[in-house]
Image (cartoon, helix red, strand yellow):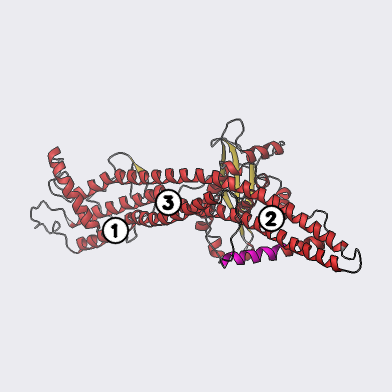
Amino acid sequence: MEYSTTGSPLKANSMSIDPEKELFDSPAPPPASSPPAPSVSDDDHDYDAEDAREREIEGGSAGGATLHLSVTDPQQIGEGRNAHTFYRVDVRQGQYSADPIASVRRRYSDFQWLFQRLHAEKPGAIVPIIPHTQAMQITKRMSEELVEERRVHCEGFLRRVQVHPELEGAPSLAAFFSPDAEVFEAAKKANPGNGKDETLDVDATPTEKAKEKAKHFFVKVGLKANVARGVGELEDTRDGAQMEEVENYLNTLDTHVKSLAKATQYLVGASKETSTTMHELGQSLFGLHQTFDPETGGEAKKTNLPSIKVISNVFASLSAINKVKYDEDHSKVGNPMSEIEWSIKAARLALKRRKNCQLTYNTYLQQIKNRETGLEKLNREAAVNPTPGAMDAKIINAQKLLETAKQSANKALGELNEVTARVFREMDRFKRAVDEELRKLYVSHARVQVDYMQQLDSEWRKLLPNNGGSVAGGAGSSSARSSFTSKGSKEAEMLMI
């Protein structure tokens, strides 16, 4: 596809800029191609079957039809420090459906809440990450650039969640898409963060629950400290060796992808740097042309060399082509590479959730050991106590606490096994997805280079005498074009360097 200097598509054979037309009247750099404006959704509609709609959104598409999610129409509410942005989230039965089956308004923090809740409800799942740009100043937080960036990221997040097999049926999804504001606010109030209450005795009083939770916390902290110091290891399930292989794979993948990303982003950015440099060259050449033009004096000698004016405009055309090439390369290669890096971070978070489950299980095992020791101590004291039954109440309470710890450990082990199985399923999909995305990424990069190579080559040839350019006027034979291809490419490379 060919483009104009502003990045808009042109008809065939219309990329070239007229060599006789002056292009550097303004010192401004070549304009960037602007992203398409977000479409504005239709007005909200009322629906009676709210429960059916929520189940449809929560559980995926209904009847085999594809649900289309979109985040559009950001609106600023409030002023000053209280200012915030609401985004409209629409769910349609197909991309081109006129009316949404659900439409809600959500803040950026609501998307972050959903991210945290999905981690808590489906630990071990690779939940897509919402790339976050910190904005402390109100002017930056409400800027159009940041609002649009967040809109794009939130839309991509929801679309990935929609097709994620492990996240299907998560309760937070139904709450997030509920048109009833009270339902959503109640869900956020009941689950403000990603924390999860530990298993406690349901018959215990609030004071007893608080004490038990505090004991559990200190045991967990002590266990973590011992592991960090290398004093002991966490007891793992029978899949521990396989999980270690997964961790090693992620570490190796992360190292290679960071290296790939650095080199790839450099290749993508080269077109932008080349565009800027050629624009500066064209400006300087045009200024030189204005100081002296031999053709205006009537004493110009016959030559097959292009004029300074023609050369400056060729550089203008090359600058525009490279700018559009950069935009397309950034969209098809640079952004996908960044998404792969984010996906690795998401996979690491999934493994971290599994590690938390393992730590919780080991915390209960440690509690069992501590309470068994405490119970043995009470039994010894009771044996030597001269008053019969004096220690019975303490022994009964210790036995009850020990039984509670054993039940909690069994439940934690079941959750750990469930999370471990989910991690293995996720990693199998993850490995295949990363492999496919990397291959698609570099195929896209190759296509961009091929698509623009001919256009760049055509512009460079305008500076070569008797080679089909605008100076000599003739197209030349096929053998002549072939003989100059290599020479033209080498000269283009030298000029770009």
Secondary structure at numbered mark 3: helix
Mark 2 Cα-neighbour bin, 10 Å: few <14, some 14–19, many ≥20: few
Name the residue carrying label 3: 337
Of the residues shown, which amino acid type is indicated by label 1? His
Amino acid beneath label 3? Met
- What secondary structure is found at the residue carrying circle 2? loop
Q: Is residue 383 visible?
A: yes
* Marked residue nearer the N-terminal end (3 or 1): 1
Question: Which span of residues is magenta-colored?
Answer: 216-228
Q: Which is more N-terminal, label 2 or label 3? A: 2
> Looking at the image, which is closer to me, 264 or 229?
229
Q: Which residue in the protein does label 1 denote?
A: 279
Q: Which quadrant would residue 54 be assigned to in this image?
A: top right
Q: Quadrant of the C terminus?
A: bottom left
Q: Give left or right: position of 301 versus 150.
A: left
Q: Nearer the viewer, mark 3 or mark 2?
A: 2
Residue 194 seen in the current view: no
State the image coordinates of residue 121 (x, y, percent, origin top left).
65, 49
Q: Residues within 10 Å of mark 3 (few under 14, many from 20)?
A: many
Gap in angstroms between the C-alphas marked 2 and 1:
57 Å
Which residue matches tag 2?
196
Mark 3–mark 1 distance (CA, rounded to whole Å): 28 Å
Find out whether the residues at labels 3 and 2 contact each other: C-beta distance under 8 Å: no
- For marks 2 and 1, the one nearer the N-term is 2
Residue neighbourhood size for the residue with mark 1, other residues' Cα within 10 Å, grouped as few (<14), some (14–19), many (≥20): many
Is 318 on the left-hand or right-hand side of 167?
left
